[in-house]
Image (tube, coloured by chain):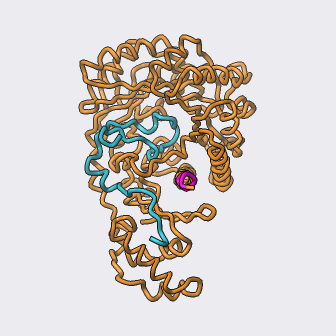
Amino acid sequence: MIHRFKAGDLFILLDVNSGGVHLVDELSYELSGELEPYLNRDASIGDVANASECPKEILDKFSEKYNKDEIIESFEEIKKLTEDGMLYTADQYENYANTAVNSPIKSMCLHISHDCNLRCKYCFASTGDFGTGRKLMPFEIGKAAIDFLLERSTGRPNLEVDFFGGEPMINFEVVKQVVEYARSKEKEYEKNFRFTITTNGMIMTDDQVKYINENMANVVLSIDGRKEINDRMRPRVDGSGSYDRIVKNFKKLVADRGDKEYYVRGTYTRYNLDFTEDILSLYNEGFDQISVEPVMEDPTMDYAITEKDLDRIYEEYDRLMEEIGAIKDSGRFINFFHFMIDLNQGPCIIKRLRGCGSGNEYISVTPDGDIYPCHQFVGKDEFKMGSVLDKTLDEDIKKLFSKAHVYSKPKCKNCWAKYYCSGGCNANNYNFNHDILDSYDVACGIQKKRLEAAIIMKIRDMLKEEA
Amino acid sequence: MKHIRTINKANLAKSAIKGGCGKCQASCQSACKTSCTVGNQECMREENK
């Protein structure tokens, strides 16, 4: 299976099963779209074929537009790539699809607070309490969660804990206690904890900034971009805007952070489909590591993104590519999360088959100690998996999630993007289609556009460097 | 090659041989929380770093 796409005068081929990316001329671009039935190595999509020379019907079809010798030359190059395992390659990974059934747990989203000091209109957590009442996690629950993770992570040296909410800074003393407790166990269990925190920036003393920057490997700073956009969707409890306060706090944190990783992370809605402006606004405020994502909301809501918005959103990503390209061309640094891609040494194919690992390698724990497949399932009783207090875990739910991979999701099987989004978000699939295996088309469309953009940006950077 | 330039090592099949060590980050923990992007994650296996 191949995927072909264009950007200006760049013609790009992605060979899905090998991950090979090829920059080609227009002739080879057109030819490659026709040659799969003649050179296909992938029995899962059609008969395997190995044409020894350029098929006559192909020659005839293209000879009006292109020189015959050139067509034959291009065919020979395409054939050579096929023989070298870089084009029309076989899908040979299905045997790995169910290898994760008995996976240990390595990642935990710790809901340190089910309370929040903002009332964001699009909040999937029902403005912080996940519909289960406003609560803070006591240290005893956090400690039990760490114990649970230590016991269930056999064979996994790297463990990660994200302090999440609600707003985790409301319960910051327990954050510190949990970090201290986990660190005290690292040697005994031969583990390395990697802590992260996701915060709205409303509470942030100098001491807290210092603590976060010393102890958190990554921080995710929630802000939507332009002041008016942010304040419309992210008001305080009294309805007033949050922007002025959070931007000041985030600047303080980033200035103190040095080279450590962070992301300002925004949500765009149908109200700001010109979200490039928000990304540029964040950049102009001094933030150069930026993630901005579409809202995932019930289509009946006025601000929800639906299929009707997709063409406009695709245009906006084209614009964003130009703007980010211009920033880079001027010698400045910017990193947009969804345009990052490592074409040479990204994750192994085994990881790529099943994405985030929710419900299997990755779980969420509520302030009461209840376990859910991830933060987005919290409050859905049918997905409650157990409790860190009595160390129960529903193995049937775990198994269900372990088998959610690109081979069990019907829409993924023949999708070119499957090894980059890895089957998409199980929670989105459930929220929109009531089935973790039924991919949500709007998210798929946006994901594919972003992946093309990431590859285009990579190639542009490479060509610029060479020039 | 005159018509085609290969940009990367095309090594997904090779990555299976020593893959699945589980040392890497869960993709959703990085900066998503509402989607899933795996292609931009880092391999944490020491010999690949």
The answer to which quarter of the image holds residue A410 is bottom left
Q: In which quarter of the image is the N terminus of chain A?
A: bottom left
In the image, residue A106 lies in the stretch drawn in magenta: no
Residue A98 percent across, percent down from the top left = 28, 49
Q: Residue at x 33, y 71 (%)?
A: A83
Q: Which residue is drawn at 67% across and 54% down?
A: A315
Query: Which tint was used for chain A?
Result: orange
Left or right, A390 with reference to A138: left
Q: Is residue A434 visible?
A: no
Q: Residue at x 49, y 24 (%)?
A: A197
Q: What stretch is highlighted in magenta?
A: A462-466
Residue A161 point in image, percent of width and height:
41, 26
- Residue A378 in the image: above or below residue B15: above
Where A18 sits versus A67, above or below? above
Residue A330 is drawn in which quadrant?
A: top right
* Residue A98 at least partly seen: yes
Chain appearing in cyan on the rendered image:
B
Residue in the picture at 49% in, 81% down: A71
- The C terminus of chain A lies in which quarter of the figure? bottom right
Check the image and name the residue furthest to the front.
A467
**Membership of A465 in magenta stretch:** yes
Q: Is residue A381 above or below residue A352?
A: above
Q: Residue A194, how many percent across, how many down? A: 39, 26
